[in-house]
Each structure stands twice: as C-alpha cells, then as structure tokens.
Image: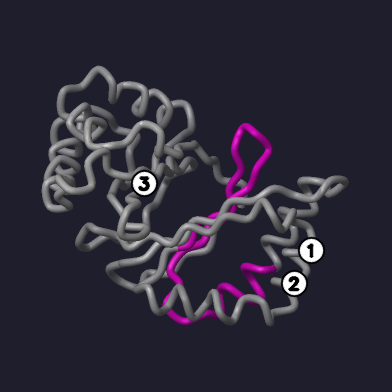
C-alpha cells in the first residue's frame, strides 16, 4: 500500500475491472506495483493507493486524495504514463468502472491497519424526499451505536458519486469481520434507518481485500 499523510481527505476514487483472458494474477499485481511506484506516487495530492481483489477474481484500485481536483488531475495524466499503458494493456477495457466519490465527512485521514474495504453505492428510494443531512446524521448514529460495538472497523464514511448516487465506504481489519458487520445491519434498528433510504434495486455492494 502507498500512503502519505496529507491532512484531511475529501475525494476517493474506486476503479473496478477484470484482467484479460490469459493474464496471470501475478502479472497484474506486478503491473499495479510498477504503476504505483512510477506514476501514482509522483502525483500531487494523492494520499493513498490500495490494489484490491474480491472473491470473484476481479480487481480494484482505491485512491484517496486531498480534493476532487487532485484526483481528476491524476486521471487526466494517467493515460500518458508508460506504466499506466502497460497496466491497462492487461485489463478488459469494457470491464473498467471508475466511481469518483466526494467524501461527505470532515477530517477523514488515511486509514491504517486494515485489509478489507467494503464499497457500496445506492440511489435514494424517494429522491424528492431524500435529505442528505439526514442521511449523514444516520451515518453518525450508526458509528456511535453499532460500529462502536466492534474493534475491527478502521474508518467509515458516506460519499457522493453524483446527484442521484451515494456511497457507503468502510475500511475494516479483515474480510470476515467486514462481512459479519455488514450482515448485522439488518438486525440493528439504526442501520435499518439507512437501509430504508436506499432503493434496493440500485444497491451495488462488494467486499475487497488488499493485494498490494
């Protein structure tokens, strides 16, 4: 994992993708490490990068930045870098999904001592009645009343993807506890308040473990 202490972070990009047929997992891990060292670590405002996998054999990059502009500047420079081109050549182009998130919590720093990221997006069930402030208040209560029961969570916050899409992101010590904590949402009254806001058909949730 690459990380720098750059103070409060306001942006997180999450890119998901699959490797081309015939590409070995070891090859894509090596390419990700080269890309991080040669390109990403040189970009201004980038605080953390994790290269991740899931139990479906897919891969992801989690990148946190000082602000949206720093993240977008990195994205604009990305196609020109040699290590980026070598990395991208291993991926199925039509599988790539980049989700930029504006972090909706103050004073979020670089998480530490985690091996799993839970990343989920959703759209409000009733957009005309949805209130972002109320969602964030529920998120705060979840941290105080539910997540505080566990020692494994390392960071938790809500993000905004676009005008109709939000995200919930959690950094957890390990994959097993990330799944257990998430499954417990349906048995906790405070968590059910958040679930009640979501359009169930819009939920896109998965668990990702650190590869590099």
From the viewer's perspective, is 192 left or right of 71?
A: left
**First reached walking from the N terminus: tag 2 or tag 3:** 2
Callout 1 secondary element: loop
Q: Specify the farthest residue to the top.
A: 187
- The answer to whether any part of residue 32 appears in the image is yes
Q: Could you tell me how many numbered marks the image carries?
A: 3
Give the side of residue 47 with respect to residue 33, left or right. left
The single residue placed furthest to the front in the displayed view is 128
**Coordinates of residue 35 in the picture (x, y in percent):** 67, 68
Above or below, comparing residue 200 to residue 88 in the picture: above
Q: How crowded is mark 1: few (under 14 residues within 10 Å), some or many (20 or more)?
A: some
| SS category of the residue bearing label 2 | helix
Q: Quadrant of the N terminus?
A: bottom right
Rounded to the nearest angstrom, the CA distance separating label 1 from label 3 is 29 Å
* Pointer 1 residue: 89
Q: Distance between the residues labelled 2 and 1?
A: 6 Å
Task: Specify the label residue 85 is tagged with.
Answer: 2
In the image: residue 207, left or right of residue 127: right
The residue at the point 28 percent across, 21 percent down is: 186
Question: In the drawing, what numbered circle is on residue 160?
Answer: none
In three-dimensional space, the C-alpha distance between marks 2 and 3, rounded to whole angstroms, equals 29 Å
Instruction: Give residue 169's mark.
Output: 3
For the residues labelled 2 and 1, say whether their Cβ atoms are less than 8 Å apart: yes
Q: Is residue 170 visible?
A: no
- Asked which secondary structure carries label 3, the reply is strand
Q: In this view, does 123 lie above or below 187?
A: below
Image: magenta residue range? 35-63
Left or right for 50, reference 24: left
Query: Callout 3: few (<14), some (14-19), or many (20+) C-alpha neighbours within 10 Å?
Result: some
- The quarter holding residue 75 reads bottom right
């Amino acid at each position: 994992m690459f990380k720098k202490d750059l103070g409060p972070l306001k942006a997180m990009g999450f890119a998901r993708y699959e490797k081309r047929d015939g590409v070995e997992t070891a090859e894509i891990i090596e390419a990700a490490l080269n890309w991080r060292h040669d390109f990403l670590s040189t970009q201004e405002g980038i605080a953390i990068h994790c290269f991740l996998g899931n139990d479906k054999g897919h891969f992801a990059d989690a990148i946190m930045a000082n602000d949206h502009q720093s993240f977008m500047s990195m994205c604009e420079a990305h196609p020109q870098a040699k290590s980026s081109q070598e990395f991208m050549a291993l991926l199925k182009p039509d599988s790539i999904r980049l989700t930029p998130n504006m972090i909706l919590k103050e004073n979020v720093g670089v998480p530490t001592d985690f091996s799993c990221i839970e990343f989920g997006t959703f759209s409000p069930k009733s957009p005309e009645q949805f209130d972002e402030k109320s969602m964030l208040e529920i998120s705060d209560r979840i941290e105080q009343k539910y997540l505080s029961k566990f020692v494994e969570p390392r960071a938790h916050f809500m993000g905004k993807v676009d005008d109709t899409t939000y995200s919930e992101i959690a950094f957890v010590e390990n994959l097993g506890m990330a799944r257990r904590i998430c499954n417990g949402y349906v048995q906790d009254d405070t968590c059910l308040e958040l679930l009640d806001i979501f359009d169930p058909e819009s939920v896109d949730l998965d668990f990702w473990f650190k590869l590099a």
